[in-house]
Amino acid sequence: MNKTILFSAVALSLLGTGAVRAQEPAENISRSRHGNLAAAQDLVRQAFDRLTVAQQDNEFDLGGHAGRAKELLRQASDEMRQAASAANRHER
């Protein structure tokens, strides 16, 4: 019984890690056209990676706050991409 519970917990944590990796912030802003936005997007990615390390170091026991912060970083990255797209439309 205990082995089954342990196995299930490990399997779920591995699946959860894969789901988080699939939702990393994008790095999709042209450095040549929007250097500042691309640099900001790089910083978002660095923060996301640091949160991942903090979660691992604390065995993911951060009260859900690190996960929420990561979601907000994904949203920030998307907003930056939209800002670059808006600038591209404005240039025409």
Image: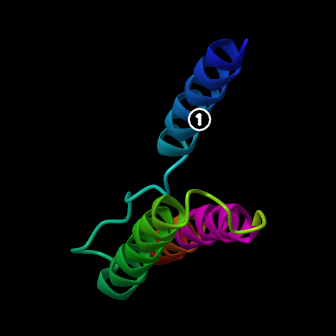
Residue closest to the far left: 32
Position of residue 18 measured from the top left corner of the image (x, y, whole percent): 50, 34
Position of residue 87 measured from the top left corner of the image (x, y, whole percent): 51, 76
> Residue at position x 59%, y 35% from top?
13
Height in image: 16 above or below 72? above
Which one is in front, 50 or 92?
Answer: 50
Residue closest to the far front: 2
Residue position for label 1: 13
Position of residue 72 measured from the top left corner of the image (x, y, whole percent): 69, 69
Q: Is residue 24 left or right of residue 79?
A: left
Q: Is residue 28 left or right of residue 14?
A: left
> Residue at position x 69%, y 19% from top?
2
Q: Is residue 47 magenta?
A: no
* Magenta residue span: 65-80
Q: Is residue 27 left or right of residue 80?
A: left
Is residue 92 something that shows in the picture?
no
Height in image: 86 above or below 21? below
Q: Amino acid at mark 1?
A: Ser
